[in-house]
Image (spheres, rainbow, N blue to C red):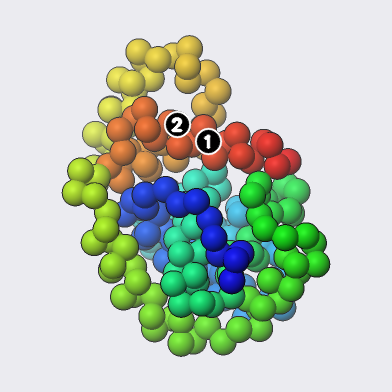
Amino acid sequence: MTGNARPQQQFTANDIDVGIRIYEALTHHARSGQGDKIGHKDLLTLARSLHPKDAVLGRAVPIGIGMKLQFVDAFCAAHAYPRLSSLAVDQATLEPVRGADGDNAARKAERHAAATFDWSIADTQLPAFATAQRAAVPARLKPRKERPADVSWYAYFCSHRKECEWINQEDKQEIINLIMAGLDPETAQMRVRAARAASVEQA
């Protein structure tokens, strides 16, 4: 399944934890949506409705969903399953994000394959895959509490105000999420900036 081939950054614990919930929301949508697209914001809303007490999921924002979908892609690719993330699209355009493979007919076929697949066996294999992915997270990416992450970001922001003018509230929340997952502030903002640029370019 060539649609699963994606350049992959290093997953953080946050990508994995939220990625599991995104997988669950996508399979839920696949079972009920008959191949319909679902926007990133709606996908997060669905995930939260399935897990209303999940604090990590509660902090997730649409700009950060790309790596969570890559986690889902990696799981599907590892087991030669249909690309479940094909159901998720940009909220505003209802189109795949930049870099999606194939033409409209191919993407529709991909969504149909994901919607009609029996995900029950896959559900039982996800925990082992997630455990293996967590084991691969570099030891240097040590999780932090929200308050220290916020302080770390503010210190970086104060010394880089000009370079950070593009950051909105959603971007800031994802940067904090990434710092909580162990990334340094500069790397966190660069990752969010890349996600924002990809979103703007495909719109």
Q: Is residue 165 above or below residue 167?
A: above
Q: Quadrant of the N terminus?
A: bottom right
Residue 193's x, y, as percent?
51, 32
Q: Residue at x 28, y 27 (%)?
A: 151
Is the C-beta separation of discs 1 and 2 under 8 Å?
yes
Q: Is residue 169 above or below residue 60?
A: above
Residue 175's x, y, as percent?
41, 36
Mark 1 surroundings: few (<14), some (14-19) or many (≥20) residues within 10 A = few
Amino acid at the residue labelled 2: Met
Q: Residue at x 72, y 47 (%)?
A: 92
The residue wearing badge 1 is 194
Amino acid at the residue labelled 1: Ala
Residue positioned most to the left: 139
Residue 47's x, y, as percent?
51, 64
C-alpha distance separating marks 1 and 2:
6 Å
Q: Nearer the viewer, residue 30 or 173?
A: 30
The residue wearing badge 2 is 190
Left or right of 113? Residue 165 is left
Which SS class for mark 2?
A: helix
Residue 199's x, y, as percent?
64, 41
